[in-house]
Image (cartoon, coloured by chain):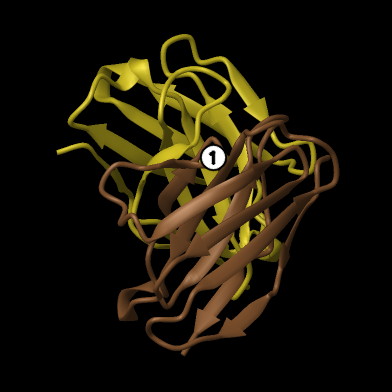
Amino acid sequence: DIQMTQSPSSLSASVGDRVTITCRASQSVGDWLAWYQQKPGKAPKLLIYKASSLESGVPSRFSGSGSGTEFTLTISSLQPDDFATYYCQQYDRYRTFGQGTKVEI
Amino acid sequence: EVQLVQSGAAVKKPGESLRISCKASGYVFTHYWISWVRQKPGKGLEWMGRIDPDDSYKNYSPSLQGVTISVEKSISTSYLQWSSLEASDTAIYYCARHSSNIWYSAFQIWGQGTVVTVSS
């Protein structure tokens, strides 16, 4: 199994901050990496696919980068609606999610 | 509107069977794979498996056992089924539509989730 490790597990930030979340894979997944946002009591929402492609309708303050085993999700200017938990997911071999990063005020 | 609508919450006893559903609308059902994802209380997301609605070909997570994924094309519905539930199956279960019908596709559309509680 490919293991996905996110860091940090949680972070505190303020509106307007630049936030970066890291996701590391236990082996190369190429650029087959997605990022999802989940709010309490809601289903996850796709933000980024293929490591850096922005899903339609997602604000441009979200961006993704990386390839191989190390990836980042960046929120350029945190907005009140962005306080949520973020998950990375590899889809190179089967699918594996990271453990999540909770972004709190 | 493209959407996946899941069946309602279920409360079961250990050893009982259960089938939950995920009904697709707003797109051609056989053109996109469906995956199922588990989220245990207070925990992260776990991929369970996927199915191609066109030919019912499936893959399951190597770390998961005891569930069956199926589809009924005529009513654009996917199912997740257990023959004998355990308390550890207590979770929210999501269905998700892939962005295409190829392996390298992310989960583009999600159902609202079905809460399954297994308790004696």
Give the total number of marks visible in the rendering. 1
Can residue A25 be seen?
yes
Figure check: A23 above or below B117: above
Give neighbour class at mark 1: few <14, some 14-19, many 20+ (Cα, 10 Å).
some
Query: Picture coordinates of residue B83 (x, y %)?
Result: 62, 42
Q: What letter labels the chain drawn in brown?
A: A
| Rendered shade, chain B | yellow
- Residue at image point 59% right, 75% down: B42
Query: A81 or A43: which is nearer to us?
Result: A81
> What amino acid type is highlighted by mark number 1?
Gln
Query: Picture coordinates of residue A5 (x, y %)?
Result: 76, 59
Query: A75 or A88: which is nearer to us?
Result: A75
- Residue at image point 60% right, 21% down: B58
Give the chain letter at badge 1: B
Tell me if B53 is positioned left or right of B47 in this view. left
* Placement of the C terminus of chain B among the 4 image quadrants: bottom right
Instruction: Name the residue that disc number 1 marks.
Output: B81
Figure check: A15 above or below B36: below
